[in-house]
C-alpha cells in the first residue's frame, strides 16, 4: 500500500484498514473467534492468517514462548466434528449441498469437501460456516483446558450444541 493510498484511507476515516494491512504485513496477523483481525503478539489465542501471495500476506511468524504455550493448548482442529456439525445443520434445515452452500456463501464443491473432511478450510470459509451453524470459531478446536465450548447466539439455532 502506497503512502498516497494510506492518505486517501485516512481522509475517508478508514484508519482501521491501514492498521489491518500493517498487521497482515507484519506476519503476526491472526483472527479471533469473533472475526476481528489482530496482532497475535497481543492476542496469542488468535488463529494465524496464512500466507497469501495474491494479497501480499507473508508466512505467519512464530510467537514467543508464551504465545506458543497457548497454541499448544489449542492443539487440533476436529475436522470430523466440524463435518458432523455441517451435516446436522443441513438435515435440520432440510437443505441440499447446493442450497446450504448458497446460504453460507461458498461453492458447493467446497462444502462437499468440508462434509467429507477432505481438507482444512481457509479461515474466512471457516468463519462463514461457523456463523451459519451458529457456533463460535473456537468450538471445533480441541482445547485441553476448556470443559465445554459455548455456542454463539443465533436465532436460527434451536438444537442442542452438545454431542456433535
Image (tube, grey):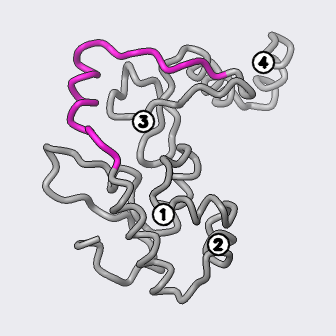
Q: For the point 30% across and 12% down, which residue is it?
A: 64
Q: CA distance from mark 3 to mark 2?
A: 25 Å
Would residue 68 be counted in the magenta stretch?
yes
**Disc 3 to disc 4, C-alpha distance:** 26 Å
Q: Mark 2 — residue?
A: 103
Q: Residue at x 59, y 23 (%)?
A: 24
Q: Is residue 18 left or right of residue 122?
A: right
Tag 1 secondary structure: loop
Which residue position holds label 4?
Answer: 6
Query: Which residue is identified by label 1?
Result: 116
For this view, does 151 lie left or right of residue 104? left
In three-dimensional space, the C-alpha distance between marks 1 and 2, rounded to whole angstroms, equals: 19 Å
* First in residue order: circle 1 vs circle 3: 3
Pointer 2 local density, CA inside 10 Å: few below 14, some 14–19, many at least 20: few
Residue 155 x %, y %: 46, 78
Q: Is residue 84 above or below residue 44?
A: below
For label 3, the SS is strand
Asked whether residue 1 is drawn in magenta, I would say no
Which sits earlier in the primary sequence, circle 1 or circle 2?
Answer: 2
Which numbered disc flags the more N-terminal residue, 4 or 1?
4
- Residue 85 position, x and y percent, is 39, 69
Toward the viewer: 76 or 155? Answer: 76
Q: CA distance from mark 4 to mark 2?
A: 35 Å
Between 161 and 117, the one lying in front of the other is 117
Q: Residues within 10 Å of mark 3 (few under 14, many from 20)?
A: many
Residue at 45% over, 75% down? 87
Question: In the rendered image, which residue does mark 3 sit on?
Answer: 47
Pointers 1 and 3 in contact (C-beta within 8 Å) = no
Q: Which residues are magenta?
A: 57-77
Q: Are marks 3 and 4 in contact (CB under 8 Å)?
A: no
Percent x, y of residue 128: 56, 57
Amino acid at each position: 500500500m502506497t503512502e498516497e493510498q494510506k492518505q486517501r484511507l485516512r481522509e475517508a476515516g478508514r484508519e482501521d484498514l491501514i492498521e489491518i494491512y500493517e498487521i497482515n504485513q507484519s506476519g503476526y496477523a491472526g483472527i479471533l473467534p469473533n472475526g476481528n483481525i489482530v496482532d497475535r503478539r497481543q492476542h496469542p489465542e488468535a488463529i494465524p492468517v496464512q500466507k497469501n501471495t495474491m494479497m501480499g500476506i507473508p508466512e505467519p511468524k512464530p510467537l514467543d514462548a508464551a504465545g506458543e504455550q497457548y497454541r499448544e493448548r489449542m492443539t487440533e482442529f476436529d475436522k470430523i466434528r466440524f463435518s458432523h456439525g455441517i451435516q446436522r445443520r443441513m438435515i435440520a434445515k432440510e437443505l441440499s449441498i447446493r442450497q446450504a452452500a448458497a446460504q453460507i456463501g461458498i461453492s458447493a464443491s467446497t462444502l462437499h469437501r468440508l462434509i467429507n473432511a477432505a481438507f482444512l478450510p481457509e479461515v474466512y470459509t471457516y468463519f462463514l460456516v461457523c456463523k451459519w451453524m451458529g457456533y463460535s470459531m473456537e468450538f471445533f478446536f480441541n482445547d485441553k483446558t476448556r470443559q465445554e465450548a459455548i455456542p454463539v447466539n443465533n436465532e436460527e439455532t434451536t438444537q442442542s450444541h452438545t454431542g456433535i
